[in-house]
Image (tube, grey):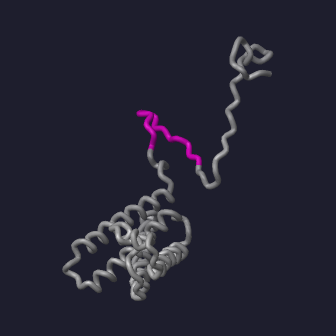
Amino acid sequence: MSFEAGNGANSDPEGGTCRKPRPTRYYPLGTEIRRKRWTDSSKKRVNSAAVSPASRRRLTYVALALSTIGIGLFVHLRGSMLSPVSRDILGDALWAAMIVWLISARIPNARPWTRYGVAYAVCALVETSQALHTARLDALRATTIGHLVLGSGFDPRDFLAYALGVVGAALLDVGLVARRANQRVS
């Protein structure tokens, strides 16, 4: 039996026509396949299953990261009312919180303490790298974005600021998770 289009090539011996077989589709692991839900009257797609829970968490974490960046830039550029030491500590804590949000956006299904540990490790690695001085690294750190991302000089006090930032983000994250769980119950 042939499934090619043409002059009767896709008809069966009894005189009916055969439908072309649908190709087999292979989806990557972890991909959820959702059927489209249609309303009877308007034939518009219902948006109830359009965003998966992991995507919703990712969007939340990206929004938190962007908010943290905004607050951090405000502290960096307009924080003259703070003492230099408190401004430095607050900036480092906000930077660590932003790293928590970005790590959480990247791997939202990982265990929370794993995400917090990875974020602190990234912060500690960047701080430790500030003890290393090469011509290229120093040139990169001399730019505004390089200074904001990589910092400028090694300071052991920053490890404490990063811990405070990660703990603050963890408390906020746990509060958001508890709020989401209460919304599901209600």
The percent position of residue 68, horizontal first and vertical second, equals: 34, 69
The percent position of residue 109, horizontal first and vertical second, equals: 55, 65
Residue at x 73%, y 16% (from the top left corner): 16
Q: Residue furthest top?
A: 7
Residue 39 lies in the magenta stretch: yes
In the displayed structure, does residue 107 sit left or right of residue 96? right
Residue 9 lies in the magenta stretch: no
Q: Which residues are magenta?
A: 33-46
- Above or below, 10 relative to 178: above
Residue at x 20%, y 78% (from the top left corner): 80
Tell me if residue 32 can be seen.
yes
The percent position of residue 94, horizontal first and vertical second, equals: 36, 75
In the displayed structure, does residue 151 sit left or right of residue 84? right
Please give the count of numbered marks on the rendered protein: 0
- Residue 86 image-quadrant placement: bottom left
Say which of 64 and 181 sits in front: 64
Quadrant for the C terminus, please: bottom left
Q: Residue furthest left?
A: 81
- Residue 171 image-quadrant placement: bottom left
In the displayed structure, does residue 31 sit left or right of residue 52? right
- Above or below, 32 relative to 112: above
Say which of 4 and 134 sits in front: 134
Residue at x 41%, y 73% (from the top left corner): 138
Quadrant for the N terminus, please: top right
The percent position of residue 182, horizontal first and vertical second, equals: 43, 68
Dominant SS in magenta: loop
Say which of 118 and 172 sits in front: 118
Residue at x 38%, y 74% (from the top left corner): 95
Tell me if residue 164 can be seen.
no
